Amino acid sequence: MSGAPTAESVRDGYARYLMPTYAPSRTLVRGEGVRVWDVEGKEYLDFAAGVAVNTLGHAHPALRQALADQAGVLIHVSNLYAHPWQPKLAEAIVRHAGPGKCFFCNSGAEANEGLIKLARLWGHAEGRYEVISFTGSFHGRTLATLTATAQTKIQKGFDPLPEGFRYAEFNDLESARAAVTDKTVAVLVEAIQGEGGVRPADPAFLRGLRALCDERRLLLMFDEIQAGIGRTGEWFGWQHAGVRPDAFSMAKGLGGGVPIGGIWAAPAIADTFQPGNHATTFGGTPLACAAALAVIHTVEADDLVANARERGRQLREGLQSLAADVEAIECARGLGLLSGLVLGEPAAPLAAALADRGLLAIPTAGNVVRFVPPLTVTSNQIQQALDIVSAACAAVWPKSGRTA
Ligand SMILES: *Cc1c(COP(=O)(O)O)cnc(C)c1O
């Protein structure tokens, strides 16, 4: 590609040089705060936020500064050497998650692999290795994590799948109880299923899982990759239910767009991995840790967890009132700034109509449009987004009777 990129030249480049794993719809070239611009200069409100990744929006001054400063000091040293930023970041996570220890890696799937390996190593002497996960879950695309992901469409074609995974019905405690065998070592659950259609776990279900895990000596492990770092209006999704995990994974929102994943484990199991058991070259680089520290400090200083709670409520109230008017909308649901508009039909046409009108949102689970704006989103921007949703609904369902 030579000269200034155009939508067409970028599309050609993808077709020619990139494996066709994705079908990207728009070509984005710049962002600032909650806004992004495409290659044709069209402006969008970014309620996709890199799939719930850009916690502080685009080009946030604190994150820019932290990256620029850190790049001039130390980017990477490997884990053969200590550096100050990993313990600082782990301490910041412990501040919000409670006492425990962390391990850092590079992505969500890798974090969940870490949880699964931790559980297997912990149960190894007793011959326990099975992990129970739930229908509608999403845990990643590596072989172990796609097996934990209880969705055949994600597993299809990749068999034989690794052994040691069992499935239970989400939000059905009896089903989880029935899945436990004498080989079971852990339960892996999302406090709110993001990819699975923005489905919150029932707090009573999570408390029941905690009791089940205590009774059968299983580890209760949360996948906080999408929900964690304030998005749901608590630092971590499990805090809504008042349960304590034995371990959890995080990734998406942690680095504000800089790749980093991690796991946290409670003190009783925090020393399960010993030197030689688990490692990754890029895990917790000075650069990634500096980025995550800037994200966490900004979320703390600007009280963005409270903003996520309040702006999320505003968004869902607005979406819910649309649901009263538009027949195709079943309901709005979610926690904090992880919200879904549930339709009685496929979500892709509405998501496309939103983008045409300048609002990026993500169709998921077939019939849900997911809204995951940066935690910095303002009440004005929520209102603008609601106006766009309303206009797009009127365009997609022109005859759907306004009841008033
Ligand atoms: C995105 C996601 C993952 C996978 O993370 P990657 O960084 O894409 O590997 C796992 N679990 C949940 C809940 C996610 O939302």
Image (cartoon, rainbow, N blue to C red):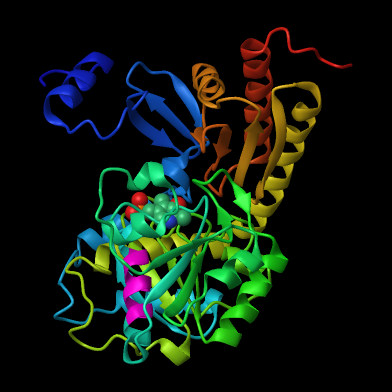
Instruction: Name the outermost residue toward the right.
Output: 404
Q: Nearer the viewer, residue 121 or 110?
A: 121
The answer to whether residue 299 is above or below residue 61 is: below
Residue at the spot x=53%, y=57% of the render? 227
Q: Which range is magenta?
A: 111-120
Q: Is there any visible trace of residue 59 in the rendered image? A: no
The N terminus is located in which quarter?
top left
Prevailing secondary structure of the magenta residues: helix
Q: Residue at x 41, y 80 (%)?
A: 183
Residue 48 vertical position relative to residue 269 in the rendered view, above or below: above
Q: Nearer the viewer, residue 332 or 166?
A: 166
Does the magenta segment cover residue 216? no
Q: 329 left or right of 45?
A: right
**Residue 360: % across, % down:** 50, 29
Tell me which corner region of the image, top left, top right, bottom left or bottom right, holds residue 128.
Answer: bottom left
- Residue in the picture at 55% in, 52% down: 193
Residue 148, x across and y down, in percent: 40, 60
The answer to whether 315 appears left or right of 124 in the picture is: right
Q: Name the spot of residue 232 as percent of width and height, x first.
A: 61, 56
- Residue 311 placement (x, y as % from top left): 68, 45
Can you see residue 20? yes
Q: Is residue 113 magenta?
A: yes
Name which residue lies at 32% across and 43% down. 156
Depicted 161 relative to depicted 341: above or below? below
The C terminus lies in which quarter of the figure?
A: top right
Number of numbered discs on residues: 0
Residue 77 horizontal side relative to residue 332, left or right: left
Front position in the image: 39 or 397: 397
